[in-house]
Amino acid sequence: MKILVKCTLIVPVEVPADPDYNLHFDIEDNHCPGTGFVGAAIEKMMDKCREKSVCWACNFQGKNEIVNGLDLLK
């Protein structure tokens, strides 16, 4: 059986302080979650957490939500 799960993370991200920098375009429109500033922040947290043997996703207040397939579990 396969279900769909939405995984949500809250990621603190360092970005340029340049007023001409288009934050919305760069993060929301141009990069996937695994690239750019967001991807770098996630990778950094993953590395730190692996060293300490703790969950990196929990450190980003990770949350799972079943979005499709719950009816199959009945």
Image (spheres, helix red, strand yellow):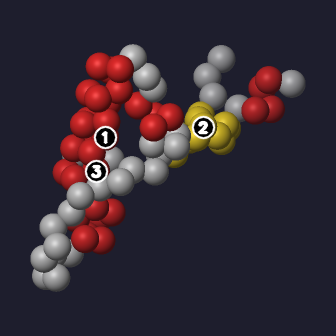
- Above or below — where is 52 with respect to 13? above
Residue identified by numbered label 3? 38
Q: Residues within 10 Å of mark 1 (few under 14, many from 20)?
A: many
- Residue 32: tell me if it is visible: no
Q: Amino acid at mark 3?
A: Val
Q: Which mark is residue 64?
A: 2
Q: Amino acid at mark 2?
A: Asn
- Quadrant showing the N terminus: top right
Q: What residue is at 29 percent from the left and 19 percent from the top?
A: 51
Label 3 crowd bin: few (<14), some (14–19), many (20+), radius 10 Å: many
User: SS for tag 1?
Assistant: helix
Relative to 17, is 15 above or below? above
**CB-based contact (under 8 Å), mark 1 and mark 3:** yes
Which residue has dot 1 on it?
42
Is 22 displayed left or right of 53 in the figure?
left
Give the CA separation, mark 1 to mark 2.
Answer: 17 Å
Residue type for callout 1: Ile
Quadrant of the rendered image containing residue 28: bottom left
